[in-house]
Amino acid sequence: MKLFLLFFSLAAFCLTASERTPLSLYPELKGVPGAEAPCEAVFSVEIPALSPYRHLPGEPLRDGTPGKTLSLLTARNEIGHAAFLLFPVKAEKQAVFEVSALSDGKNTLPASAVDLRIVHCWYQGGTAWSSYFADPLQKELVPELLLHDETLLKTDTEKKDNFLRVGSRYLWISHPEELDYGRFNYVLSPVRDASRLAAFSLEPGVRKRFFLTVRLPKDAVPGRYSGTLALKAGDKTLETLGLVVRVLPFSLPDPGTQYDPGKKFYVSMYMPPIGEELRMADGNFEPVLKRREAMYRNMLEHNLAYPLVNTPDRKRLPEEVADRLFRENLLLMKKCGFPRDVLMGGISLISWYLISQPPERHPAGHEEKFYRDMDNQLAVIREVMGKDILVYPVGWDEPSMKFLQGQRPLWKQAHERGMKILSTAKDRHLQYGGYNEDFANYPGTFSRESARKWHLMGNRITSYANPHTGPENPDYMRRAHGMELYQMDYDGTCNYHFLEGSGHNIWCENNREAGFRTFAVVYPSADGLIDTLQYEGFRAAIDDIRYATLLRQLAGKASADSKKTDLYYTGKKALRFLALTRMDTANLDAVRLEMIRYILELQKALSPDSAPAPGGKER
């Protein structure tokens, strides 16, 4: 009798395991095709990589497609992306993905071209996902961090607390502002992610989100490449996903403006002060420059080609140390491959005495030293980056009208030395500074009318704080830094801030004064950066503009000859598409696909003289 009962119990267990369905563990999958069928290991769903939805546990799928094949399109000098969810029905403590090489039958892409990361959800303030203003009284679970090693962060979903691995211990990073533990030294603190996807756990009832990128080798041949992602635990293969990458037959140019695709769209952002990082490192150049090199290469991969370079503060560092750091930073930027036609920042035009005080109140020799330092810094920039580089020193941040007018003598000195001026601005500046303010950085809502006014004077306009960095929603950040600005005829983006962490603990959102959340698109590690969804949205924003620039170049060429009627019409239709599409509300993935369709059609129609537009280059 006992043997019979044992047999019956084992049979019942086996039956339950074999008939276990994703829907039985994940009620949110109700109505999703295939979720009611028995599943041995995981149920997979491809989702838009930059989805506007959070895809949190328990939330219904709003834009996912169940299946076992991931697909993406990418230009030859673009980094492609895809994303998917796994719904485990079986527990595994040590699962891994084995990525195969991809082949089109003749050519291959190495497995190393594919990078997989886990999207980590953690608790942030009550306005998380959609705002940079703080709400410390609430906690929202949001997906943000892209990790190779999921154990770098631990999130307690019951207490709604986050813990960061620092060396061998975990640091509480959800403490209230009243328990201020001071500045977090991100230069020397041993916060390190793995270089590739590490083993991860699978737990029934707990979905897991992955973000995938593909970096093509420079000699990649256009074609349709296929490979696999084998999910394994030990010697067992739990599931095999297909990966299809279509390499498009063109390279993308640098981003250009809508009103003139031959004019550059400058991609900039405020940078963390390198002088403060040297102070964190106790004056040791090595860890600072090592981190900076990793950061700079990462920025170029994300299209951030014209970062706003800050000058080491010669009041907080010995002057000879500040001067050495200034030169080393420029040499590093040159080594990493930043463009050398324009340098945003680099020279400070900030002097409270010269801007706001009469000469009799200036410290002795202050004015002479200020301009001597300016000349020395300009000489170093031209020596390192090239004598023809155009430098845009930065004016006083968000100046009053008094301070705007007070900067006129300093700006005149800069202009006489062959430089131009970048300054935060607004429409009122047109009357008082429009003649000497060359690149206006507008806060908040942008408009085509503001752009029109600055362009009429031959000046340029860029944007910040619409929103500031911080909101995790990648679709929001993609839209605001990309096609919305482009369609308003702006000349670039220059947001605040890439990583503002020198004065507080950047990992703790509550440790930030003035009612704001942390201003950052990335998080710091000892050897580089921790990527985020919003940063990937930023990269896609600029890639959208690169696609639009190529399309306008080809469409302009096609519509130049009205005698070739079909070609003329195709070019005009492409321009009509860009002109009439509401980039503030359109599905940007669909916009990207339509731009690709027009590019391929125009390339074919313009053949044989349809080579990629000038400006396309490997990044």
Image: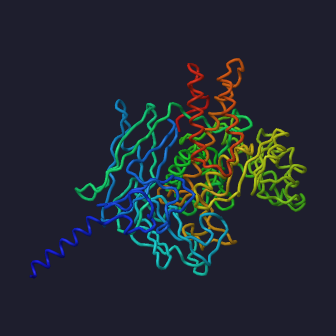
Instruction: Please identify the quarter of the rendering in which residue 464 is found.
Output: bottom right
Instruction: Please identify the quarter of the rendering in which residue 152 is found.
Output: bottom left
| Vertical comparison of 265 with 116: above or below | above
Depth check, front residue: 198 or 281 = 198
Q: Position of residue 89 (x, y in %)?
A: 33, 65
Q: Position of residue 532 (x, y in %)?
A: 53, 57
Depth check, front residue: 147 or 187 = 147
Q: Position of residue 232 (x, y in %)?
A: 29, 56
- Residue 14 in sight: yes
In this rendering, the count of numbered labels is 0
Image quadrant where one finds the N terminus: bottom left
Structure colour scheme? rainbow
Q: Name which residue lies at 81% across and 48% down.
A: 450
Q: Position of residue 484 (x, y in %)?
A: 69, 48
| Vertical comparison of 531 with 109: above or below | below
- Residue 201 in sight: no
Q: Name which residue lies at 9% across and 78% down.
A: 3
Depth check, front residue: 474 or 576 = 576
Instruction: Please identify the quarter of the rendering in which residue 219 is found.
Output: top left
- Residue 328 vs residue 404: left or right? left
- Residue 399 vs residue 95: left or right? right
